[in-house]
Amino acid sequence: MIEIEVKVRADHSKALPILKKIGAVKLGVENQSDVYFAAPYRDFAKTDEALRIRSLNDQAVMTYKGPKLDGISKTREEFETPVDEATTTQILHALGFSEAGVVRKKRDVFRAGEITVCLDAVEGLGEFLEVEIVAESEKELETSRAKLFELLKQFGAGEKDSIRTSYLEMVLEKNKG
Amino acid sequence: MIEIEVKVRADHSKALPILKKIGAVKLGVENQSDVYFAAPYRDFAKTDEALRIRSLNDQAVMTYKGPKLDGISKTREEFETPVDEATTTQILHALGFSEAGVVRKKRDVFRAGEITVCLDAVEGLGEFLEVEIVAESEKELETSRAKLFELLKQFGAGEKDSIRTSYLEMVLEKNKG
């Protein structure tokens, strides 16, 4: 599975009327708490990978994200499994993985055709808009990316606004300063 | 959670009437397929740890087992989470873990008081009997172990018969030869 995703900064009070205008359907709100893990044997910041346990409501999901596949979008390979949060955290700690950082956000999820639109309010970072298409393979990469940027035009955003830095990197950067 | 466990070789045709005599209740039969993983950064055979995905019926469970805590039983720390088998295997492979070996067995599970008794028919290895108590902490280790060996007496087995070698080690040893 390939996740083709573009993220930009966006004022939600301005983005909401545009979502309404284009007929996007609200799917729900999630309060996500993401714990990212560091491996004891390679530096995920350098290899551009991520291992995360996301908790929302009473559910938890473990996700691995591989290195980004291109220079503009945030396209990458992604594997995901539902897990028990507490014991999976214990397993990762026992294997020598440590917590690298935590990202907390309120995510309003919308659907606009085949595109998922997220309005993210990230604790300590501000407001963002993320658009995403999930594709079966890399073949659909170019077409999907074009569709995402076409939609982003409606919000006055272009390729130059694409933020490839992850929320985790932004949180870690902020904690440093 | 602490798993206090003793394993011995046992002829199932002889063990079954004894289980009946002591009033053990049959809980079920499981056809288990266990895939064990090797870490890219430490040798689980040396550290006496194990990371496993067990599939039975349509379910899968990922289990981490820590080093054994004593010299007689197979007591060790154990963390377990339900997972999706296919994507969890993909996550482990992406993280650099590789498959170390596979153990397939038919396990008949019985309950005798607080003790779980398993009759294991392991592909390529033969028939075994495993007795187990799950305890909250290491404090109960001595008492629980005594209870297990008390029960094993019924089957004509004692401390000298306790096999601390795992099925995986036995399978790998057999494949070598």
Image (cartoon, coloured by chain):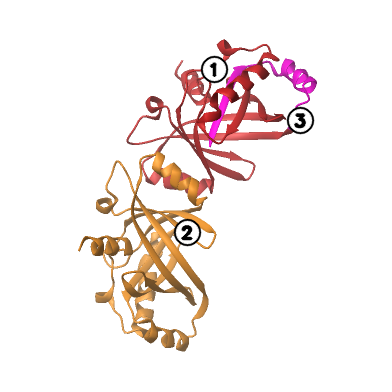
Chain colours: A red, B orange
* Circle 3 chain: A
Q: Label 1, on which residue?
A: A163
Tell me whether the residue at label 2 lies in contact with that at label 3, contact meaning CB atoms closer than 8 angstroms: no
Q: Label 3, on which residue?
A: A25
Assign a secondary structure to mark 3.
strand
Of the 4 image quadrants, the one containing the C terminus of chain B is: bottom left
How far apart are the two marked residues, 1 and 2, measured between alpha carbons? Answer: 40 Å
Q: Is residue B24 above or below residue A13?
A: below
Q: Which residues are magenta?
A: A1-26
Q: Position of residue A62 (x, y in %)?
A: 51, 41
Q: Nearer the viewer, residue B64 or B142?
A: B64
Q: Nearer the viewer, residue A111 or A12?
A: A111
Label 2: few (<14), some or many (≥20) within 10 Å? Answer: many
Q: Label 2, on which residue?
A: B55
Which amino acid type is shown beneath numbered disc 3? Answer: Val
Q: Nearer the viewer, residue B77 or A5?
A: A5
